[in-house]
Image (cartoon, rainbow, N blue to C red):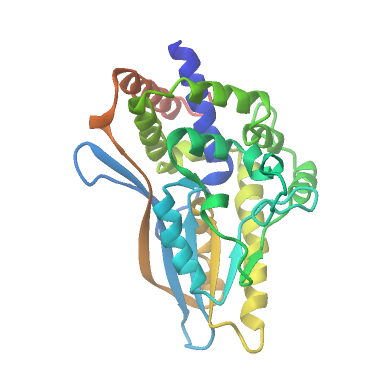
Amino acid sequence: MVRFKRNLIAIAVSAWAALAAAQAPTQATSPFMRMLKPSASREELQTKARRYTPANGDGPIVWLIGVAHVGRADYYKDLQKLLDYQSSVLYEGVSRNGVDPAAQTAADPKDDPRQRSTYQALSDALGLEFQLYGIDYKRPTFHNSDLSWEEMQALEAKNPTPKNSMSLANIGAMLDANSPQGKMLAASLAQMKGDPGSIEAMHLIMIEALSNPEVIAENLSPSLNDLLIKTRNAKVLGDLKTEIAKQPAPRSIAIFFGAGHMADMEHLTEDLGYVGGEERWYTAIDGDTKKLSPNGQMMLDTMRAFLTKKKASPGK
């Protein structure tokens, strides 16, 4: 049973790690995701928004707004306020077959593509909210600035990931609630119902795993990391340059992507002559070890041991 739960928890963390918060293996000028410990027992996963201004004073303000894809409802409400203040928002959203899940509205909720995501399964089970429901994307200022799934598949085919490494197909399966991996996750989450202490353990597991760049980087090969982070970032930074060049230029522009994208995006300070300034931190998930049940404590201890073992034996 312990091994079963450990594997299922690893699937949950890997699913998040793959697209939600994959970290580029480079040093960030300033991190956009961190773990904060307000007390000896409490932990918080926080993401950052940072304001940039042109060094020469000529051009729009740019905000890099990092986000976690599952979090507290008030977390997304606070981010929405900042996003709605911007003249233009370039957001992350991997479309499939021409369908942007962030902007999709199905006549029947059962057909909503967002419901078929493991993110939705996680948020439902853990008393959190899925970003695509927590944020209102139907603003006229919001623009999808991401690659499509089909574009990423074509790029991966030109530079395949090494054998025995995570591939784009693996990620797609982990993020699909109807896949075998998604169903395993659902089975694991179902065991937590009626045990708030186990749910608290999952909060802590996510906080500790997703705030650790070393853990995140282990899940991705360099080629897949480049595809998921740098290649997609190149797309949004190209769109940013187009927005800045508009006449008249927008008053302010926000890039709204997973927090793991932002370390690489910060090179806009060099490429576009922008200087970083004000920073705002937002709490996405919180957890407290005092609220753990015996089963929850076992889950947390098991996952901590699992992550420690992976760190001590990289690539195994």
Q: Indicate left or right for 96 with 221 as reference.
A: right
Give how far across and how far down residue 229 sits, in percent: 60, 51
Question: At 58% across and 22% down in the image, what residue appears?
Answer: 184
Give how far across and how far down residue 208 sits, in percent: 37, 37
Q: Which of these two is toward me, 61 or 102?
A: 102
Query: Does the rendering let one see residue 252?
Result: yes
Query: Looking at the rendering, which quadrant does residue 92 occupy?
Result: bottom right
Q: Is residue 17 above or below residue 262?
A: above
Q: Is residue 32 above or below residue 222?
A: below
Q: Is residue 260 above or below residue 125?
A: below
Give how far across and how far down residue 205 sits, in percent: 39, 33
Q: Which of these two is toward me, 140 or 266?
A: 140
Query: Looking at the rendering, which quadrant does residue 176 occupy?
Result: top right
Tally the marks: 0
Q: Which of these two is toward me, 150 or 80?
A: 80
Query: Does the rendering let one see residue 22?
Result: no
Q: In this view, does 219 lie above or below 50?
A: above
Question: At 35% across and 28% down in the image, what residue appears?
Answer: 196
Give how far across and how far down residue 183 sits, in percent: 62, 24
Instruction: Name the residue furthest top.
Output: 1
Instruction: Name the residue furthest left.
Output: 40
